[in-house]
């Protein structure tokens, strides 16, 4: 299986925040039909009082074509023991791309023997952070264990474009609750964390004192120092968006139960599938919160390559569907005000087109999040609202992930002139 998919450029420094560049990507879903490249089975013990951890992993390399694979791990952990019958040799250096924060392990693999995947074992122990990260997401302390790819807490394939599945036993003392992308189950002395759909990252949070609000559609872990503020607005937004999106999705739904983490921090919100970490909601307006929740939940149906030119589909469609949800819940004027604001933001900016047949590279923020929703608004006006809604459902059902496929769907649902008109609208 050869996939051309570059989610993050290797030149990203640690401080540049991989999670931010991945923010909003439905990582759990995008390649659900594919087999993972790597499968991780591990056990980890967290010592939150000291910020230390002890971990052991068996990583199965499911791609039989690889001769060498390079993993990155936080350099604060010291040097890991790498072993296994399939490990021919290991070369370890500090990766110069990350200012000494990441230790790279280049593992030469032995020959493939039948169908059996080759295995690489990692064992390590120590503090995860040294110094504490400036970026607010990753935490290992007595309030919260929240770890993403940015902290390199597990051996991460430095090609930055492989998918993984994971089965992890966590040992942690004390009373904790957990949220994750797939399964985070409380077991004796810890958690069992499973990630069965291939994804870039293993993402979860454990909380030692969160207030929990739950329904059939969601579970909210409010981990703020003063929980409760704006929780009613949040549950209302979740209920409205879930119903709205499930109606729109038809057979492509329903959404899985969402896990929402509410934090005090000022920045560093993200989503992984229906795991959504929210920041600073007390300063959010009702309409912004509604739009944000709808946007993140709409990413459940995002399938385009997030690292390339087609990312405008992921972000533009999620944002426009969110605006449709706002229009549905809060009326035409609120919806129109957002789009007016977006048009103003673009005024006088020197920006590339949204998409052309020879486009390459990830479009800038203003293109994906502001220009693309305006183009989709124009398409909705041309098609009519009912037909546009059908188009959105078709995108969800067919998992449309490229602009040519989207244009073909537009032609199928309307006509060639509309297809051509939208193609030139994107190329403006
Ligand atoms: Zn997004």
Image: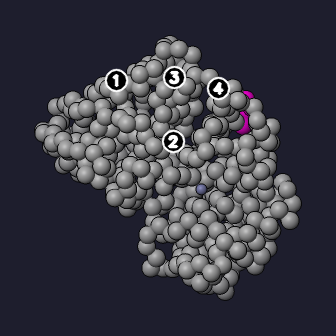
Residue nearer the viewer, 332 or 392: 332
Q: Is residue 405 above or below residue 95?
A: below
**One can see residue 203 in this view:** yes
Q: Earlier in the sequence, mark 2 or mark 4?
A: 2
Distance between the alpha carbons at the discs numbered 4 and 1: 25 Å
- How far apart are labels 1 and 3 at the CA level? 16 Å
Q: CA distance from mark 3 to mark 2?
A: 15 Å
Q: Give the CA separation, mark 3 to mark 4.
A: 12 Å
Q: Does the stretch in magenta take in 214?
A: yes
Give how far across and how far down residue 169 sits, in percent. 43, 23
For the residues labelled 1 and 2, the Cα–Cα distance comes to: 22 Å
Name which residue lies at 76% across and 61% down. 324
Where does the image place residue 181, in percent across and percent down from the top left? 54, 38
Out of 358 and 197, give the one closest to the viewer: 358
Q: With 359 as the anchor, is 322 left or right in this view?
A: right
- Label 2 sits on a secondary structure element that is loop
**Which residue matches tag 1?**
54
Left or right, 411 with respect to 169, comes to right
Which residue has dot 4 on it?
210
Q: Earlier in the sequence, mark 3 or mark 2?
A: 2
Q: Earlier in the sequence, mark 1 or mark 2?
A: 1
Question: Which residue is identified by label 3?
Answer: 142
Residue 26 against residue 418 in the figure, above or below:
above
Mark earlier in primary sequence (1, 3): 1
| Image marks 2 and 4: residues in contact by CB distance under 8 Å | no
Give the spatial CA distance, label 2 vs label 4: 18 Å
The numbered disc on residue 136 is 2
């Amino acid at each position: 299986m050869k996939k051309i998919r570059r989610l993050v450029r290797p030149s990203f420094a640690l401080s540049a925040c991989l999670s931010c560049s991945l923010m909003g990507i439905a990582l759990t879903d995008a390649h659900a039909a594919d087999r993972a490249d790597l499968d991780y089975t591990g056990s980890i013990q967290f010592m939150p009082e000291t910020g230390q951890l002890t971990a052991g992993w068996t990583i199965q390399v499911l791609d039989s074509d690889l001769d060498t694979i390079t993993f990155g791990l936080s350099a604060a952990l010291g040097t890991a023991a790498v072993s296994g019958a399939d490990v021919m040799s290991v070369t370890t250096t500090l990766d110069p791309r990350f200012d000494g924060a990441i230790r790279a392990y280049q593992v030469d693999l032995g020959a493939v023997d039948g169908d059996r995947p080759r295995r690489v074992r990692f064992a390590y122990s120590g503090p995860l952070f040294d110094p504490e990260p400036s970026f607010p997401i990753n935490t290992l302390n007595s309030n919260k264990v929240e770890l993403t790819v940015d902290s390199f807490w597990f051996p991460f394939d430095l090609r930055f474009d492989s998918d993984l599945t994971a089965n992890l036993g966590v040992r942690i003392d004390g009373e904790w609750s957990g949220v994750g992308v797939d399964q985070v189950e409380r077991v004796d002395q810890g958690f069992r964390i499973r990630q069965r759909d291939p994804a870039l990252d293993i993402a979860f949070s454990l909380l030692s004192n969160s207030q929990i609000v739950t329904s059939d559609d969601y579970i909210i872990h409010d981990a703020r120092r003063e929980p409760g503020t704006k929780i009613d607005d949040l549950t209302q937004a979740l209920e409205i968006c879930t119903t709205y999106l499930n109606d729109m999705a038809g057979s492509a739904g329903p959404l899985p139960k969402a896990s929402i983490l509410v934090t005090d921090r000022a920045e560093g919100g993200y989503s992984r599938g229906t795991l959504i970490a929210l920041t600073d909601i007390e300063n959010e307006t009702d309409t912004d919160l509604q739009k944000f929740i709808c946007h993140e939940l709409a990413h459940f149906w995002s399938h385009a390559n997030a690292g390339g030119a087609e990312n405008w589909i992921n972000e533009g469609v999620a944002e426009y569907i969110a605006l449709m949800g706002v229009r549905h819940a809060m009326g035409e004027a609120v919806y129109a005000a957002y789009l007016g604001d977006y048009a103003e933001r673009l005024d006088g900016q020197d920006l590339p087109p949204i998409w052309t047949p020879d486009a390459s590279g990830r479009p800038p923020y203003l293109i994906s999040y502001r220009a693309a929703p305006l183009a989709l608004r124009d398409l909705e006006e041309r098609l009519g609202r009912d037909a546009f809604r059908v188009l959105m459902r078709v995108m969800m059902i067919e998992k449309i992930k490229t602009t040519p496929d989207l244009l073909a769907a537009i032609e199928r649902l309307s006509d060639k002139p509309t297809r051509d008109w939208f193609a030139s609208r994107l190329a403006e």
